[in-house]
Each structure stands twice: as structure tokens, then as C-alpha cells.
Image (cartoon, rainbow, N blue to C red):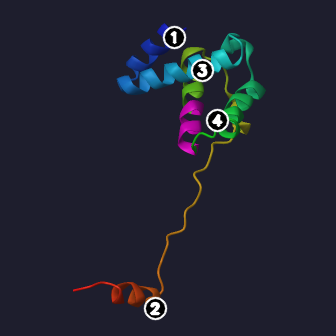
Amino acid sequence: MLDQMRERIRLKHYSIRTERVYCEWVKRFIRFHQYRHPQEVGAQEIEAFLTELAVARNVSASTQNQALSALLFLYKEVLSIDLSWFADVVRAKKPQRLPVVLTVEEVRSALAQLES
């Protein structure tokens, strides 16, 4: 199955790095489900895997989305399985960071501390 995945990735002209990473995510997914074939696994198991990544392993949103993309590729392109049940799987969102802005008085204070 991984050979089929590599072949499909190369046909689509994905980078070699994407090929390696996607195959690694598929291996991790299969190991997580005690080596069950992905055809035997459904939406709940995929969500369980992604939740495990986010909660127990504390991976970033982009890492979780990368794993999801690898699984989407596997199911859609390699196994040719209808992805209608994937509609409920939600992509992780990066936390929004607010910029740190100093007040005018804080800037004056900081500049006053500098020596010429």
C-alpha cells in the first residue's frame, strides 16, 4: 500500500519530502490502530488519531493538519474510498496571536534608559 502511495504521489508531482512525510504519517496511523488496514478504519478512528496528536502529543495545528492531509490523500487517491464521512473532520486552527504593542509612555521610558 505504501508503494502505491509513493507511486501516486510521484504521478501528482509532489515533492520527495511530502512523499516521505505522508508515508510516515500513514505508518503512524496504522501503528496507532494496531496494524489494522486503513480500509477497516472509519471516521471515528481517524478523529481518535488526530485527537491523540493534539491532546496527548501536543503537536501544533500545522502538524495535525499535515497528518490529516496525508490521510485524506491515502483514502482519496490511493484507496479510492468515498470521503463523504470526512466532512465532519475539522482541521485544527492555529491559535491567533495578538501583537505586543507598547504605549507611548512605555516607549519613552525604554528610550530614556538608553545611553548615547
The answer for how far apart the CA atoms under marks 1 and 2 are is 60 Å
Q: Residue at x 50, y 24 (%)?
A: 22
**Amino acid identity at mark 3:** Arg
Which disc number belongs to residue 57? 4
Report the quarter where the C terminus lies: bottom left
Distance from Cα at disc 3 to Cα at disc 4 = 13 Å
Q: Main secondary structure of the magenta part?
A: helix
The residue where tag 2 is placed is: 105
Mark 2, Cα crowd under 10 Å, few <14 / some 14-19 / many 20+, is: few
> In this picture, is 78 found above or below 62?
above
Which region shows up in magenta?
61-68
Q: Secondary structure at mark 4?
A: loop
- Tell me the kind of residue under disc 1: Leu
Disc 4 or 1, which lies upstream in sequence?
1
How many numbered marks have been drawn onto this rendered protein structure? Answer: 4
Marks 3 and 1, the one that precedes in the sequence:
1
Give the numbered dot on residue 91.
none
Picture coordinates of residue 9, whole percent (x, y): 43, 20
